[in-house]
Amino acid sequence: MATTGEASGPAAEMRKVFTRSPLLGSDTHSLCPGCGEPNAIRVLMETIEEMGERGNTVCVLGIGCYTAFGALMQIDCQQAMHGRAPAQATGVKRVLPDRLVFTLQGDGDMVTEGLQEIVHAAARGERFTAICLNNAAFGETGGHMTATTVLGQRTKSTLGGRDAGRHGHPIKLPEMLAGLDGVAYVARGTVHTPVGVKKTKKLFRAALETQRLGLGFSLVEVVTMCPTGWFVSAAEGPRFQEEKLLPVFPVGELKRPRDLRV
Amino acid sequence: MAKSVGTVVIEVDACKGCELCIPVCPPGVLSMSPSVNAIGFRYPILRDGCTGCELCAEICPDYCFEVFRAAPSRASAEVTA
């Protein structure tokens, strides 16, 4: 069932200006209402298509809600063990250096389970792109605290809010990796507003071009809504993200190669 | 009644009722339906006045929107020139 503003469908003089990327297939996905991850993945697929890399891209998936997109994305995908996607992507990129290789991970996978893998891959200057969908919670396994959960944030395992004295401070991975010499491009985006989604697409393009030019390791962290894990309604997700998460995780480019033109 | 220079086609049964599209619509022509779709969620319905700006499609996590915009007609182009 589909509806339009006009009972007979769009008038003949109207031209289609936006449609779903063919790289996303045609199936629906199983992620929660108001989740931010599908927005990030959509613009990532659009970027790959616009770069003409559709048949030349390998995605290494971590473990998280976004793993379900392995069935939707019309590109080659590999499944890594929890947190180990950067090690696996290292292997793929070294064996197939002409492919565009990226990891798709969450904060739970990349920052909590697999921090060692991502830090060493970055320090080695591995020429793949790491993408971290940061929703400050373990979404898939029930909404408990991750290393990026912000202070005061309620999760299933910090019901009174994350406390610095008991649970430590959130890890800001882009800021941490930007100081390493092997790292060429680091940025953080957001998908809680349409403008944020458009800007995130540009960050993906810059990171993937950095890889295509062989300039070194690239990372884009995207702050994504998780209303289920934040105990708010789907419609409240963007406001919660703006007020609680973005002050801790400011959006923008942290490191950029001088030779990059996009 | 506002003139529509754009429109959207909404894949109603893919909608999970998150309502993210409602506040981002600049002309405010989207509102949630009183009825529910096949999977039990309310979904957005469009009134006249759509500009085809694509912001609903940018924020929709369930890829429900296709956006259409009126191509500038020859007559209006001549007037502008």
Image: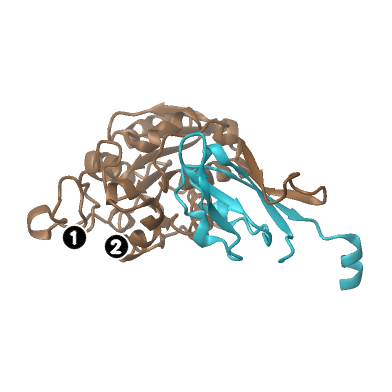
Chain colours: A brown, B cyan
Q: Residue at left 75%, top 47%?
A: A10
Q: Which residue lies furthest to the left in this view?
A: A166
Chain letter of disc 2?
A
Nearest the eye: A22 or A49: A22
Residue B38 versus residue A255 in the image, above or below: above
Helix, strand or loop for disc 1: loop
Q: How many numbered circles are shown?
A: 2
Q: Residue at left 12%, top 53%?
A: A167
**Quadrant of the rendered image containing residue A93:** top left
Helix, strand or loop for disc 2: helix
Q: Is there CB contact under 8 Å for labels 1 and 2?
A: yes
Find residue A237 and report its horizontal and vertical position in percent: 37, 55
Nearest the eye: A261 or A238: A238
Residue type beneath disc 2: Lys
Residue A63 versus residue A10 in the image, above or below: above
Q: Which residue lies furthest to the bottom in this view?
A: B80
Pointer 2 local density, CA inside 10 Å: few below 14, some 14–19, many at least 20: some
**Quadrant of the rendered image containing residue A138:** top left
Q: Residue at left 26%, top 47%?
A: A137
Chain letter of disc 1?
A
Q: Give the residue number, with chain letter if any, for mark 2.
A: A244
Find residue A164 and report its horizontal and vertical position in percent: 12, 59
Image side of residue A44 versus residue A136, left or right: right
Find residue A33 and report its horizontal and vertical position in percent: 41, 44
Residue type beneath disc 1: Gly
Q: Earlier in the sequence, mark 1 or mark 2?
A: 1
Q: Can residue B54 be seen in this view?
A: yes
**Quadrant of the rendered image containing residue A51:** top right
